[in-house]
Image (cartoon, grey):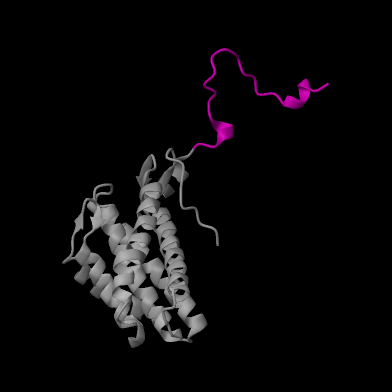
Amino acid sequence: MRVKSKWHKSQVKTIEDIGGAMAFICWRITKNHLEDLINEGFVIEKEQVFDVITEYLCFLIQSIDRLVFKTLNSKQRQELINKLAKQSAFYYQENKTERIGEGNHWKSFINTYNQRSQDYSDYEFIGNEPNYRFLRYFGEKIKLAMTDVDEKWIVQQMVEIQAPKAFKKIAQSVDDLVSVDKIISKKQQSDNKANKIPRSKRQSTRKDINYTNKSSGEHLT
């Protein structure tokens, strides 16, 4: 599936458009970071992969929530984060079912997300970036998701390298996706489509010619 991570600033987009694109980007960032950790020699067992995925997605969603605070109004922000969390849960359900087996993985993810959402509210952003305690909390959760053999080094790796790298990537994507001309609701989009006048019925705005509705075939030679 191909999802744009950047739109023209003159475009009009819905919260659903933005949330769907952000969810895909969060998933892509998470997969790339899993590969980074494995390449660095960290041990992540099959079941632990999805625990790490959960923590990454929660961290990224909470970061997005802070980043859009000044751009979106409270209703838009709530709709965006709800869309983002639910779409992330869908990806989680789909991939864990394929890799591990059947189960209510969607619900499991949402339960963890709700808890992390509450916990992250205790930590701040400074200068539009997560402070040390925000990053440290993320690192500690990753440590709990992995094997004991890596617990001595993983928090430092997350705080100093992985978390800032992931945040930088999602911050750029957020800026690209919300910097459009106008953000509307899905209902507004539907209403606009319903009220749109077909091109063939629009009145000409040119005043330099008198238009007569004749077939263009008459002018062919």
| Left or right for 218, reference 163 | right
Taking the view exactly as shown, the residue that stands out farthest to the right is 221
Query: Image point 24% across, 70% down: which residue?
Result: 136
Q: Position of residue 60 (x, y in %)?
A: 33, 64
Q: Is residue 21 above or below residue 147?
A: above
Query: Where is residue 124, by image quadrant?
Result: bottom left
Against 213, is 71 above or below?
below
Tell me which residue sits at (44%, 57%) in the image: 21
Please state if 42 lies on the left or on the right of 118 as rendered. Answer: right
How many numbered discs sit on the rendered protein?
0
- Percent coordinates x, y for residue 89 in the rendering: 39, 72
- Please name the residue shown 55% across and 62% down the image: 1
**Residue 8, position in %: x, y?**
46, 41
| 82 with respect to 18 (left or right) | left
Span highlighted in magenta in the image: 197-221
Magenta residue check for 205 = yes
**Residue 57, image quadrant:** bottom left
> Can residue 103 be seen in this snapshot?
no
> Viewer-proximal residue, 83 or 9?
9
Q: Residue furthest left?
A: 122
Q: Is residue 168 above or below residue 85?
A: above
Q: Predominant secondary structure in magenta? A: loop
Q: Quadrant of the C terminus?
A: top right
Residue 164, image x, y percentages: 33, 61
Asked if 135 appears above or below 218 in the picture, the reply is below
The answer to whether residue 77 shows anywhere in this view is yes
Magenta span has 218? yes
Q: Nearer the viewer, residue 206 or 203?
A: 206
